[in-house]
Image: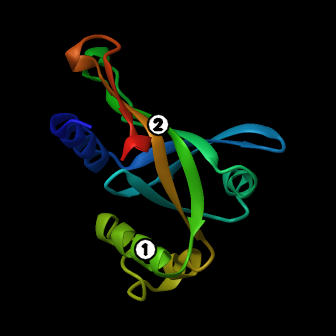
Amino acid sequence: MSAALSQRVAACLREHHVMTLATQGETGLWAAAVFYVNEGLKLYFLSSPASRHASNLAREPRVAVTIQRDYDDWPQITGIQAEGEAVEVSGDEHTHARSLYGDKFPLVGRAGSTTGAIAQALAKVHWYRFTPRRLYLIDNSLGFGHRDELDCRRG
């Protein structure tokens, strides 16, 4: 991936906070909005293991995601469309994801620093990592429908 495109993707991931996660399960397709934190192109998110999308991930890790703001000015639309895999993380990676998440979302805080209702809620969630295989950066400021593709499988 070119350095300029890599920087634009990194900026987009930093500027946004919510991704829409599309999964496939026994009862069909499902989409859910989840808050994420990124480390490079890896996106970490948390969810209840009882949620429909988490149940779907347990059966089928292949997913698609989108990241964008709610724009009303079409020429300003920027965002990401990606396909890849989302898997539950544990051990050191769980701890690392939790730390990254706490840095981005101070309300959630770092592991061991939260109390009350937030701590109780966090004790019930599982942590997941989305790793893209292919990613598109949409940027209408470069022309209506403009998108640049990253084939993430090439390292």
| Relative image position of residue 86 (x, y in whole percent) | 57, 53
Which amino acid lies under the numbered mark 2 shown in the image of this protein? Ala
7 left or right, relative to 147 = left
Q: Quadrant of residue 113?
A: bottom left
Scheme of colours in the image: rainbow
Q: Earlier in the sequence, mark 2 or mark 1?
A: 2
Quadrant containing the N terminus in the rendered view: top left
Secondary structure under tag 2 reads: strand
Q: Is residue 15 above or below residue 70?
A: below
Q: Is residue 148 above or below residue 97?
A: above
Q: Residue furthest right?
A: 26
Which residue is under mark 1?
98
| Relative image position of residue 15 (x, y in whole percent) | 26, 46
Q: Is residue 122 above or below residue 76?
A: below
Q: Residue furthest bottom?
A: 112
7 left or right, relative to 122 = left
94 left or right, relative to 71 = right
Which residue is under mark 2?
82
Whether tag 2 and tag 1 are in contact, CB under 8 A, the answer is: no
**In terms of depth relative to the viewer, which is nearer, 1 or 81?**
1
Pointer 2 local density, CA inside 10 Å: few below 14, some 14–19, many at least 20:
many
Q: Quadrant of residue 106?
A: bottom left
